[in-house]
Amino acid sequence: MRLTWVMIALAAAGTANAGTRFDRTVAAEAKGVVDISNTSGKVEVAGWDRNEVAVHGDLEEGVERVDVNTEGDHTIVKVVLRQHNSDDGDAILRIQVPRASELHLSTVSADQRIGGVSGVQRLNAVSGEVITEIAAADLEVKTVSGDVHIKGHGDPARLHVSTVSGDVRLERGAGELEANSVSGNFVVSFDTTRAVHARTTSGDFHFEGKLARGASFDVTSVSGDLNVRAPAEGGYAYDASSFSGDITDCFNAHPDKDGPVGHSLSGSRGEGGGHLRLRTMSGDIQLCDRP
C-alpha cells in the first residue's frame, strides 16, 4: 500500500512539472511596435528603460513554441499551439518592453495585465480580463465576455472601449471617451474630459468628473440606468429623457411628463457653454452638476 501511494505521488509530481520554461530577449526600438498574441493562459506586460523585449514564460505541454522576432521597428511575440490540441495549452507570459512602445495585444481565454507602458495600446480579449495602466497616449480596448479595468493619471488621451458582456471601470481618465457595451456596466471617473460618447444596451453608465469648457457629453442606453455627476467649466445645456424610467437631479429642476409615459428634463447650468444629452428607454436618470 505504501509503495502504491509513493507511485501516485510521483506521478502527480511528474504531471505538475510537465510544463517547460521559456526565456528569450531580443533587441527592439525604443518607440517601436510590440505585437503579442496568446490563445490561453495569461499575459503580463511591463514597460522598462531598455531597448529590448524580454519574454519569460511557463508553457504547458500543449504549447508547441513561442515565436519572438524583431524586424525593423516591429517585434512579434506569438504563442503557437500543437495541432489538434484540445487542452493543456496554457502559456503564462511575463514580457518586458521599452516603455514608449506601441503595444498590440490579443488573447483568447487569457487575462491581460499591463503596467508602465506609455505608448499607444490596442488590446483585444475574448473570455479574458483586461487590467491596464495608461498615460498620455491613445487606448483601444475590445473585449467579449471580459471585464476591463483602466487606471489613468489624469493625462489627456483618446480612449475607445467596446465590450459585449464585460464591465468597465475607468479611474482618473482625461481627454475623450468613446464607449460601447451590450450588457456590461460602466463606472467612469475623469479628472477632466472634453468629449464623452457612450452607448449601452442593458448596462448601466455611471460617470463622475469635470467637463471642460464647451465639452460634448452624449450617453444613450436601452434599459440601463444613467447616473452622471458632472460639474463643468462654463456650465452646460442639458437634455435628458426616459421613456419609462424616472429622472432626478440635484438642482431642483422639474422633469416634464411626455404624455401617458415618458419624462424629459432640459435646461442649462452656468453659462451653458457645453452640451449634455442623456437618453434611456426603460432606465432611470440621475443628473447632478456637483461632484
Image (cartoon, rainbow, N blue to C red):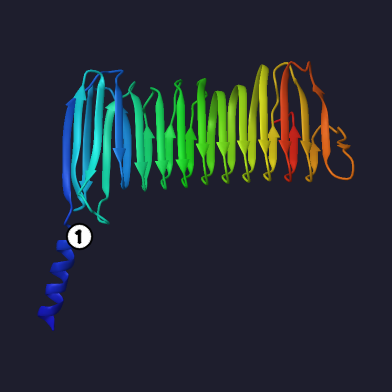
Q: Along the line of sight, which residue is nearer the eye, 277 or 86? A: 86
Kind of residue sitting beneath label 1: Ala
Query: What residue appears at the point 20 percent right and 24 percent down from the top-left corner?
Result: 70
Q: Quadrant of the C terminus?
A: top right
Please give the name of the residue rendered at 53% of the width and 35% of the height, measured from the top-left corner. 170
Compared across the picture, whether 76 is left or right of 18 comes to right
Considering every residue shown, the one lying at the far left of the view is 3
Residue beneath the point at 72% across and 26% down: 276
**With 183 as the anchor, is 45 left or right in this view?**
left
Is disc 1 placed on a helix, strand or loop?
Answer: helix
Residue at image mark 1: 16
Front one among 137 and 224? 224
Instruction: Kindly give the residue lying farthest to the front in the view shown.
Output: 84
Q: Is residue 88 left or right of residue 185?
A: left
Depicted 48 relative to depicted 7: above or below: above
The quarter holding residue 12 reads bottom left
- Circle 1: is it few (<14), some (14-19), or many (20+) Cα within 10 Å? few
Name the residue rendered at 25%, 55% in the picture.
88
Residue 22 placement (x, y as % from top left): 17, 42
Q: Position of residue 150 (x, y in %)?
A: 48, 35
Asked if residue 178 is positioned above or below residue 281 in the image, the reply reads: above
For the view shown, which residue lies furthest in the bottom direction?
A: 1
As drawn, is 138 to the left or to the right of 185? left
Residue 167: percent from the left, percent from the top?
A: 53, 44
Q: Is 162 rendered above or below residue 64?
A: above
Look at the image and tell me in which quarter the N terminus lies: bottom left
Q: Quadrant of residue 216?
A: top right
**x then y, percent, for residue 137:** 44, 21
